[in-house]
Amino acid sequence: IRLFFSIDFPSRFVYDDLLTRQTIIVGIIFTLMTTAIFAAEHFFYRWTDARLRSMEMEQLSTKAQLEALKLQLVPHFLFNNLSTVTALIDRRPDTATLYVTKLSSIYRYMLANRTEHTISLQKELEFIEAYLFLYEIRYGNSIKVNIEHRSAMARFGLPPLTLQLLIENAIKHNVFSIDSPLYIHIDFPKENLMVVENNRSPKAEKEDGTQVGIRNIQERYHLLHQPEPVIVENDHLFRVEIPLIIVE
């Protein structure tokens, strides 16, 4: 604009100061309108992308729920649990009652949190205790679980069923017995980090669906724009480092 006003136009151009000012104002208005249109287009695409990510996240959450329910609802699983309850009723009725209570709490947790992208760590740990109780009753000392330093984790969370998928993966793909137990260790070495590890004794033949739960967890962390879990694996140990998410 300074350059424009510094030019001495010939008289034949019929230079008019008012017309010039009107032209500049119209130009500014046109520029603002053009900028607004491009800004609106940009935010529309950002909003659409966010919606697509949200839909994909919901699909993965649903997939995780269905995968977990599939693991729980297979006839073999129900048959084993009903057989366990039947055996406990006569010998240990109090334990049988607790067993049924824990079993119902597992399904209640899944149904109550089926649409959540993240869940508090405290709720996830309460759920996993109920889940592990069923296996500890069934397998006794063949499975040993240790959970440490959970008191300082109140403000953190993670995608629902993360622990369940990791523990199910360990139980599903390893051979264990009283003489050679499966050790599952859950620890929090840092404020925003959870580590789940187990000793390895792989089955001779891998079952279908190996690493499905791990991939599901990684994809959900990716969609939440969070650092993805780190997997460390060797002949004797399987370790997954899970970043914790701050929940409001």
Image (cartoon, rainbow, N blue to C red):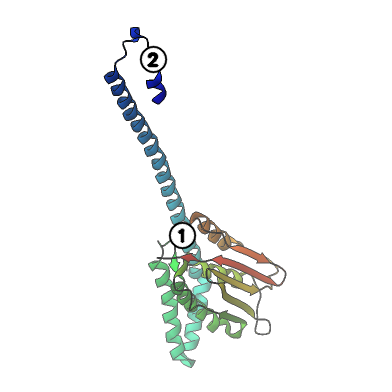
Q: Nearer the viewer, residue 234 or 4?
A: 4
Q: Which residue is mark 1?
A: 61
Relative image position of residue 30 (x, y in whole percent): 33, 28
Disc 2 crowd, CA 10 A, few/some/many (<14, 14-19, 20+): few
Relative image position of residue 27 (x, y in whole percent): 34, 26
Relative image position of residue 21 (x, y in whole percent): 30, 23
Extreme residue in the left direction: 18
Q: From where the camera sits, is residue 220 visible?
A: yes
Q: Which residue is mark 2?
A: 8
Relative image position of residue 96 (x, y in whole percent): 45, 86
Q: Is residue 191 left or right of residue 205?
A: left
- Amino acid type assigned to the residue bearing label 1 in the image: Ser
Q: Quadrant of the C terminus?
A: bottom left
Q: Nearer the viewer, residue 238 or 122?
A: 122
For label 1, the SS is helix
x 32%, y 13%: residue: 15
Q: Quadrant of residue 115?
A: bottom left
Q: Quadrant of residue 155?
A: bottom left
Q: Quadrant of the N terminus?
A: top left
Extreme residue in the top direction: 12
For label 2, the SS is loop
Distance in Å between CA atoms under marks 2 and 1: 69 Å
- Amino acid type assigned to the residue bearing label 2 in the image: Asp
Q: Nearer the viewer, residue 70 or 28?
A: 28
Of the two numbered discs 2 and 1 on the same chain, state the one appearing first in sequence: 2
